[in-house]
Image: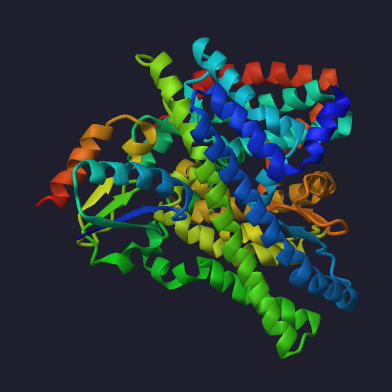
């Protein structure tokens, strides 16, 4: 079971939009997962997660692999971001 | 015609808005079931909202009235926050027409090259609708109301174009811009202040590093903590004993936690429409340089925004108490303080001290504009069934400079609308020549 955290500034609107797309990607690739939404400021509470998908570039290193999820909002570079997510989780 | 319109509006926002969204969903080609789901989900968000607003009447209003009696306290207008503001805006005639109208305006402006931004942040069309609804209600003329709303939509697109490169650079995300109704309106002030700061030697290269502070103050931005502290202050001021006081604290915490949850439901309902709009733009404008206009929420993770957004909460309360002439008691929008300064972070390139000063100056303006707009807000909120009769309400959300300018000029009638349209053309030319570089 892979634990995925999708984070944006408020943990509400933007991360909901990204989360919906990430779920679709994970299901298409038959990844066994749980997904939660969080605020970017509380990411250090989720250090046991397998992947962070964030609404913007984050400088701090939490020791968890990170993918910037904005392509899912914008619709450009979605395939690349999805490939990166799968690569991290299938390792 | 007028009678039919009045009947439809009298259905209340919880019925009226879903019907409108259902029709818009069909027009956008979402199909029957997705359209129904989208409309009803938003309606459910409004129902949740009205339930949560009940908390204000039952817990907060009695306490505020007591404080008014005891101290001659003048903060009698309660801040219902952005969610209620959006609910009020969408429950008006202008609100019903806003989504297709802004969409068509955006397509035209993109086609003639007046903007590069396609605004898919549909929830925040509510800012434009609100200004339009105020103008409609004052002038009694729907064309003037729609005109005002569309002028604000255009200004927001232009503001987004102006800051696009800087936003992309600061966030590390390509091809986006921020036309969000509030954020866009705060850009002119922050740009002017940035020019002034560059003339002040002390501020020019100030390099205050308080990253460590984030972990220390971070908890203060938590809605429960804000609600708790605010509840205790209000209980003490109203002279409540433990029982009433504890109930008030819980009531205020309830407002702080529940209001944003309801906004989440409304945004979820609007998501399919936003996706459909994105698909349309992508199909018809591929090959052109186009920015995708997103909610300013995408910028909130910036460390400067997180820190100053939190520090601004107590500052806002102090300002509200000491500013002469302010009537607004900041409440539901306190938890969203970061939204008010997120563009300052971008324009000041993350400089903490500049962002803090800009944030304070901006907040003073917000409180005065929110006070000014409160009679209109109250009237529209009662009509839309969002607030109970007798309560005076407003929102920091409406403390928007674009609202203030466009509404005041819009009140002049067709002459005002003409002035606004001419001004928009000049702004468009200015933005084309002077857009911010990274």
Left or right: residue B284 compared with residue A89: right
Examine the image and state in which quarter residue B106 appears. Answer: top right
Left or right: residue B332 compared with residue B6: left
Q: Position of residue A16 (x, y in %)?
A: 42, 48
Q: Residue at x 80, y 80 (%)?
A: B238
Q: Position of residue B256 (x, y in %)?
A: 60, 65
The relative height of residue B436 versus residue B262 in the rendered view (above or below) is above
Q: Is residue A22 visible?
A: yes
Choose between A8 and B2: the one closer to the eye: B2
Q: Position of residue B146 (x, y in %)?
A: 73, 25
The relative height of residue B378 versus residue B432 in the rendered view (above or below) is below
Left or right: residue A27 compared with residue A14: left
| Residue situated furthest top in the rendering | B112
Colour basis: rainbow
Q: Residue at x 85, y 71 (%)?
A: B65
Left or right: residue B118 compared with residue B215: right
Examine the image and state in which quarter residue B149 appears. Answer: top right
The relative height of residue A6 versus residue B219 in the rendered view (above or below) is above
Choose between B168 and B435: the one closer to the eye: B168
Examine the image and state in which quarter residue B357 appears. Answer: bottom right
Choose between B57 and B200: the one closer to the eye: B57
Q: Is residue B198 visible?
A: no
| Residue situated furthest bottom in the rendering | B242
- What quarter of the picture does the C terminus of chain B occupy? top left
Q: Residue at x 34, y 37 (%)?
A: A72
| Residue situated furthest left in the rendering | A91
The relative height of residue B140 versus residue B331 in the rendered view (above or below) is above
Q: Position of residue B180 (x, y in %)?
A: 55, 38
- What quarter of the picture does the N terminus of chain B occupy? top right
């Amino acid at each position: 079971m892979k634990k995925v955290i999708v984070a944006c500034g408020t943990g509400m609107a933007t991360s909901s939009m990204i989360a919906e797309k990430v779920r679709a990607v994970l299901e298409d690739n038959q990844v066994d997962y749980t997904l939660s939404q969080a605020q970017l400021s509380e990411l250090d509470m989720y250090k046991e997660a397998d992947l962070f998908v964030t609404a913007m570039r984050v400088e701090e290193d939490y020791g968890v692999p990170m993918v910037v999820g904005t392509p899912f909002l914008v619709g450009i570079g979605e395939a690349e971001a999805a490939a990166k997510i799968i690569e991290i989780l299938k390792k | 015609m007028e009678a039919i319109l009045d009947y439809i509006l009298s259905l209340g926002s919880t019925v009226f808005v879903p019907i409108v969204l259902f029709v818009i969903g069909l027009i956008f080609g979402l199909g029957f079931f997705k359209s129904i789901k989208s409309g009803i989900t938003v309606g459910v968000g409004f129902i949740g909202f009205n339930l949560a607003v009940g908390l204000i009447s039952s817990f907060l209003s009695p306490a505020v009235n007591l404080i008014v009696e005891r101290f001659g306290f003048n903060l009698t207008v309660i801040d219902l926050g952005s969610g209620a503001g959006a609910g009020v805006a969408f429950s008006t005639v202008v609100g019903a027409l806003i989504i297709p109208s802004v969409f068509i305006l955006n397509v035209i402006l993109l086609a003639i090259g007046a903007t590069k931004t396609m605004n898919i942040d549909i929830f925040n069309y509510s800012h434009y609708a609100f200004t339009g609804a105020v103008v409609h209600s004052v002038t009694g003329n729907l064309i003037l109301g729609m005109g005002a709303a569309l002028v604000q939509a255009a200004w927001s697109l232009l503001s987004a174009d102006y800051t696009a490169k800087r936003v992309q650079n600061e966030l590390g995300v390509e091809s986006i811009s921020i036309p969000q109704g509030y954020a866009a309106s705060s850009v002119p002030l922050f740009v002017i202040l940035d020019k002034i700061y560059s003339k002040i030697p002390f501020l020019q290269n100030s390099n205050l590093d308080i990253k460590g502070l984030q972990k220390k103050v971070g908890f203060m931005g938590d809605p429960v903590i804000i609600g708790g502290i605010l509840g205790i202050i209000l209980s003490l001021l109203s002279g409540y004993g433990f029982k009433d006081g504890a109930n008030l604290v819980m009531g205020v915490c309830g407002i702080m936690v529940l209001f944003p949850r309801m906004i989440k439901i409304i945004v979820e309902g609007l998501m399919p429409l936003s996706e459909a709009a994105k698909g349309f733009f992508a199909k018809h404008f591929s090959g052109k340089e186009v920015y995708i206009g997103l909610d300013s929420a995408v910028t909130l993770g910036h460390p400067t925004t997180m820190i100053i957004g939190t520090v601004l909460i107590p500052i806002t309360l102090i300002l509200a108490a000491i500013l002469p002439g302010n009537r607004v008691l900041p409440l539901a929008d306190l938890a969203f303080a970061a939204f008010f300064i997120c563009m300052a972070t971008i324009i000041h390139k993350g400089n903490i001290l500049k962002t803090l000063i800009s944030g304070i100056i901006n907040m003073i303006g917000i409180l005065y504009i929110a006070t000014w707009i409160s009679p209109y807000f109250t009237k529209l909120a009662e009509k839309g069934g969002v607030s109970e009769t007798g309560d005076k309400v407003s929102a920091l959300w409406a403390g928007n400079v674009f609202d203030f300018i466009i509404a005041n000029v819009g009140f002049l009638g067709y002459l005002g609308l003409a002035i606004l349209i001419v001004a928009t053309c000049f702004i468009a030319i200015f933005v084309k020549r002077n857009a911010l570089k990274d």
